């Protein structure tokens, strides 16, 4: 900085190295969005990559998702689902990710899978208000999920239905994958996540199944067992660990798509860590993307950065990764629409999982 004859300061770098560094940093202008040239969601997401803030992050997620789906190494894509996604209206979006070959393994909270099953039985979620009189709703047996309502009487019916179904199964321990597949056989709904996963051979894991209405139904089954001195069904969560780790160790490479965070995010990450049990070093996920509203600075897992996961070996140090801090009811449909419009799953081989009890005998494309 120098002083001119007029008394004003002139800002000018004198050091050649600093000038070159400055030129390098200021070589990519932010691209102003031109909607007149945007004819599709895919066009919009492509334009987002040249913008800033969360638009750029979302555009990056789309780009990395494209790379996951077109990678010649054919990574196994693991989808983690948490949050009120069915209540938000994303049921068919998730189902279409399975139907159109955009994911290979699903790890979900129990609430999402229960609400999928609830709708497969013919029941609905309803538009409500976040400012509702909750005391009145309680009197009417209406449960509120932010601005969405569900009928508690119907929930109670489905809970008991699941408990009674468990009573029809051969007594013994089941993984959540095995139990959910059998449960899916009791309904036929082309828009169901569980039904479509069964038809396409996609394993669905629910590591925290107890913490859901499915768990409530299974608790009713357990009560019935004790009362009648009968053997019955139990979910073996460690068997879940054993099974999902085989999905990882039998894959050439893996990739992760986290919607929100919670247990599914950590579970998918831990499946990488558990590879050592099988004397297998996965090297970490080759790709990882996440859409969430949780912030990293609180220290919780849901908002923790994908870079932080690299320190644990869960995500490869050279992985392509991106996070968009955008609520999933907005962000997920845009990413999926981008992939569907570009037909990214069309030329991708499907994985075939061949299970014998809790052993993954073969994983082939």
Image (cartoon, rainbow, N blue to C red):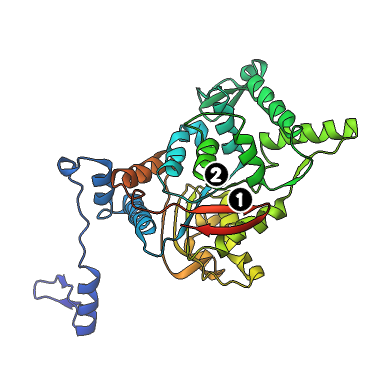
Q: Position of residue 120 (x, y in %)?
A: 55, 28
Reading the chain from its start, which is encountered first: label 1 or label 2?
2
Residue 170 image point, x, y percent: 76, 39
The number of numbered discs placed on residues in the rendered structure image is 2
The residue carrying mark 2 is 82
Do labels 1 and 2 touch, CB within 8 Å?
A: yes
The residue nearer to you, when weighing 3 against 359, is 359
Dot 1, crowdedness within 10 Å: few (<14), some or many (≥20)? many
Residue wearing tag 1? 263
Q: Secondary structure at mark 1?
A: helix
Q: From the viewer's perspective, is residue 14 above or below residue 58? A: below
The foreground one among 62 and 128 is 62
Q: Is residue 317 visible?
A: yes
Q: How many residues crowd around disc 2 within 10 Å: few (fewer than 14), some, or many (20 or more)?
A: many
- Judged left or right of residue 174, residue 81 is left
Q: Is residue 301 visible?
A: no
């Amino acid at each position: 900085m120098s002083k001119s004859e007029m008394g004003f300061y002139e800002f000018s770098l004198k050091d050649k190295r600093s000038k070159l560094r400055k030129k390098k940093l200021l070589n990519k202008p932010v691209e102003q969005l031109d909607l007149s040239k945007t004819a599709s969601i895919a066009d919009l997401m492509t334009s987002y990559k040249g913008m800033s803030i969360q638009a750029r992050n979302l555009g990056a997620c789309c780009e990395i998702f494209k790379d996951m789906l077109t990678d010649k190494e054919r990574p196994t894509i693991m989808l983690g689902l948490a949050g009120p996604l069915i209540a938000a209206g994303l049921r068919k979006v998730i189902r279409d990710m399975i139907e159109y070959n955009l994911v290979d393994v699903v790890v979900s909270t129990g609430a999402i899978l229960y609400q999928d099953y609830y709708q497969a039985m013919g029941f609905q979620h309803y538009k409500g208000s976040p400012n509702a009189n909750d005391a009145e709703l309680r009197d009417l047996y209406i449960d509120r999920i932010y601005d969405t309502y569900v009928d508690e009487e119907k929930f109670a019916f489905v809970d008991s239905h699941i408990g009674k179904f468990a009573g029809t199964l051969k007594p013994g321990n089941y993984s959540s994958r095995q139990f959910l597949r059998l449960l899916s056989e009791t309904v036929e709904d082309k828009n169901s996540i569980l039904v479509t996963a069964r038809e396409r051979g996609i394993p669905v894991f629910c590591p925290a199944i107890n913490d859901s209405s499915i768990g409530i139904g299974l608790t009713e089954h357990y009560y019935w067992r004790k009362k009648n001195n009968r053997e019955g069904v139990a979910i073996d969560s460690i068997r879940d660990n054993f099974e999902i780790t085989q999905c990882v160790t039998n894959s050439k490479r893996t990739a992760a798509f986290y919607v929100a965070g919670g247990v599914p995010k950590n579970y998918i990450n831990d499946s990488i860590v558990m590879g050592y049990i099988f004397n297998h070093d996965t090297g970490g996920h080759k790709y990882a993307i996440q859409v969430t509203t949780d912030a990293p600075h609180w220290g919780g897992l849901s908002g923790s950065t994908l870079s932080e996961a690299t320190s644990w070996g869960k995500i490869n140090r050279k992985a392509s990764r991106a996070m968009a801090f955008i609520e999933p009811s907005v962000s997920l449909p845009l990413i999926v629409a981008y992939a569907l419009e570009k037909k990214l799953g069309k030329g991708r081989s499907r994985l075939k999982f061949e299970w014998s009890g809790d052993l993954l005998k073969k994983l082939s494309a």
